[in-house]
Amino acid sequence: MVINSTSPMVVVANRLPFTVQKNPVTGQMERKHCAGGLVTAVAPVVVETEGLWVGWSGQHQEDGVVEIPEANPNDQSPTAGLKSWQVKPMMSQKTLFDNYYNGCCNATFWPLFHSMPDRAIFQQDKWEAYREVNEQFAKLTVEAVQSLSKSNPETIPLVWLHDYHLMMAANSIRDRCDKLGLPIKMAFFLHIPFPSWDIMRLFPWDDELLQGILGCDSVGFHVEDYCLNFIDCCQRRLGCRVDREQMLVEHNGRTVSVHPLPISIPYDRFVSLAEKAPQVVKNNEQEQLLLGVDRLDYTKGLVHRIRAFETLLQKHPEHIEHVTFLQVAVPSRTDVKEYQELKEDLDQLIGRINGRFSTPNWSPIRYIYGCVSQEQLAAFYRDSSVAVVTPLRDGMNLVAKEFVACQVSEPGVLMLSPFAGAGSSMHEALLVNPYETDEFAEVMHRALTMPKDERELRMKQLRHREREHDVNFWLQSFLKSVDCLADNNLTPGRLLPLREEDFSQFLASYVKESSRLALLLDYDGTLAPIAPHPDLARMPEETRRVLERLAHMPDVNVAIISGRSVENVKSMIGIEGITYAGCHGFEILHPDGTMFIHPVPHEYEVQLDQLKKQLEEEVCKYGAWLEQKSSGITFHYREVPKDKQSEIITNAQKLFQNNNIKLHQSHMAYEARPPVTWDKGRAAIYLLRTLFGLDWCDRVSTIFAGDDRTDEDAMRALQGMAVTFRITTLPNLRTAATYRLPNTDAVLTMLKWVEKRLSSRLPVTNGLRSRKTSMSSIGNNSPPHPPSSPTRRSRSNSQSPSPTEPNKQMMVMTDQVYHQLISRKNSPPRVSVSPVNTNTRSTV
Ligand code: ADQ
């Protein structure tokens, strides 16, 4: 096989394609070939592309250093051509590895991804072990990349991560390679099914997992259904922009392509094995063999199959003494209780059926529990009349394909479960639902009695397809999908830049033409790009104009919730008729000039004064400076030269600690915030209640957008009651937001979509679209908010000052009042407005 790959390949899989064991007789370390789909398919590819293989050798750190032995000269396995320098063994600490492998991979992902969630366990410590071992794999992979780059500096290595054991390695590999200036391409291939969103969401850390996979440039699954499941999860869980037609997912500003890549087998190798293999010994010439070949795993449906065979003998006694079921089961995960129980169940079932139907010259079931050579397997495949490949769920299933390849003489029949990936392409097989025992037995009967012409026809088609689509074809397709195939001019799929139309996907069903809309927006990093100094963080003129037009639309309320002080954020935005919430919602200035200030404890104020003084005197140097806010401070160190940063940071941290003030990390800054349970989330809910009344959620469509941790409070508080956007380019971020956007430009695009959507509605004639906003109007059901178009902007409270001048009356709401407000279920909120002197602050 000639593989024209443009890149040297680093395959990363949980296991090396063989284990390394000590020969008890010679005392020498030697390779032991492992059965399994991945090895059968990928090992020949690594051999022929002179790639590297990173994986676990079967030894742990406690076992000491492992030298990889060369292959035995008589080795006929697919890994025989793999030289020891091509193998990088991963060694981990035993307990950690056990938690990763048995605790998470096999006890969580294996059952979950096979849609058997009742068997799955979800444990934080196992998940942490999984992440840690993935990190170890990542480190070793980067070493492999380095060694390939040294010997081949002109080429870009292709890292190919395999299977559910390695879903969290990609981002770390990418980061490390970036730091070392090593360019790479990275792909992931999953050998098991990818479940639907309904199943995936059961995993408590599904967002991290999906982002882990999205660290690759290209993601492959066996069949299209799994691809669509993955795309669906990315869209629904992470809020990614996706293109189902082209199978693309946008994440963290990168486009990840998704590919159906049905794995296959080395077809010609199986044909030649089958042509040479010795005859399988049968009881007599006429005896027909039904064959099952599987790892002993609960997903493979062995018990269901043997039960169906029992039903066959019961319903069709004519097969007694003429048909034998040959089940070959490779021991798998033998140290796991569930697998031991499965073996016991199967042993008992087979024993019972053999006891029930055996005659002096015949037993219905021949059962081999062990690994057999490929030569022996080829003989079984060739000489069997029917292959019974009936998993309850299976990524692809190579046994079905191997059977077909080995049908070199009298054609047999393939029975196949539709729940195996292979079921979606091997159409000429007899499909059988393994759960339906009676029907299963009938299909067995049909297969055993199928006329030769029908068998020939079906098998010919099956063989033709598998010959064309063998493992070489799979590899070529994979290389093409990552643009590593020589002589292939593939333009990588890209999602078009984010357009207004894309927001229809996110918002069309939520923001209707008839909606009242509340737009709650953060400023820095959301409306204005982050700048080296807050004064330089300017909102683009276009954003300002769109916001202004939106603010003037009937039935639209715009509120800005920022960490800046209210005066500052108002001056940065400079739009009248909108609500400004400063200091993360501690101060709220309504369009009618009324001001809400959340009270803060007196003790905190004293401590804060002290901290301010000390920071100014001791650490405000080298460009570090203090931003004053009414309820807190922000200490900025962005402009401090790199070599001075750690000194400044350590000293600032000490001062926060000495003054007993909690330090909140912000963008290259530390914030002091009052120690009260008030944040952007509570402020957002408060705003919505005061603007629209207690039932705001029924009547108002709310959109929130923000870019940092403080905005997460609002995203959490509004979950299920608003559409929220997190502006981020972090590759692996947990967020409560409904969707992610890459930058402030995307926010502008979203605002433009909203404007267009709402502008298309009919003019208001019946007054239904008048807005409620004024604090003072809430509670009396009077038309609440002054209509916001300039011509209709007469104020409902004629006594209020002009909108350009904030009302000097301040409304202070205690926690107690707030709780009363939110606990009143059926009546609109009434807030007691207590005029206080702006210079004094009430304390709690
Ligand atoms: P497996 O779950 O291991 O693979 P499968 O695809 O059937 O399932 O591959 C089994 C392999 O093991 C075959 O190559 C078979 O020849 C070999 N084998 C089985 N029994 C054997 C025995 N007793 N002795 C020796 N060899 C034996 C996972 C996924 C599958 C997916 C593959 C490849 O679960 O759905 O098809 O990876 O991606």
Image (cartoon, rainbow, N blue to C red):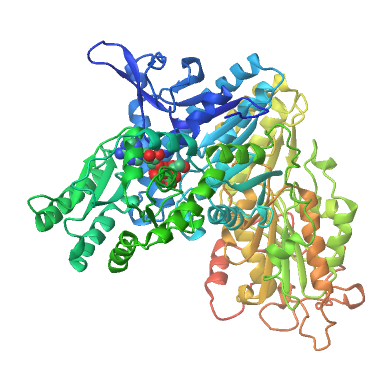
Name above or below for residue 411 compared with residue 379: below
Question: The N terminus lies in which quarter of the figure?
Answer: top right
Vertical relation: 783 (above or below) 195 = below
Q: Quadrant of residue 578?
A: bottom right
Looking at the figure, which quarter contains the C terminus?
bottom right
Image region (quadrant) for ligand 1? top left
- Expressed as whole percent of the image width and height from the top left, the position of residue 793 reads 87, 75
Residue 24 image position (x, y, % from top left): 23, 15
Residue 192, position as x, y percentages in the image: 45, 46
Between residue 494 and residue 489, name the one nearer to us: 489
- Kindly give the residue lying farthest to the left in the view shown: 360
| Residue plotted at (56% across, 42% down) | 213
Determine whether, in the image, residue 562 is placed left or right of residue 696.
Answer: right
Image position of 562 (left or right of 605): right
| Horizontal arrangement in the rendering, residue 720 relative to residue 365 (left or right) | right
Can residue 554 be seen at all in this image of the molecule?
A: yes
How many tags in the picture? 0
Q: Residue furthest bottom?
A: 766
Q: Residue 672, position in %: x, y?
A: 63, 42
Residue 125 visible here: no
Asked whether 736 or 756 is in front, the reply is 756
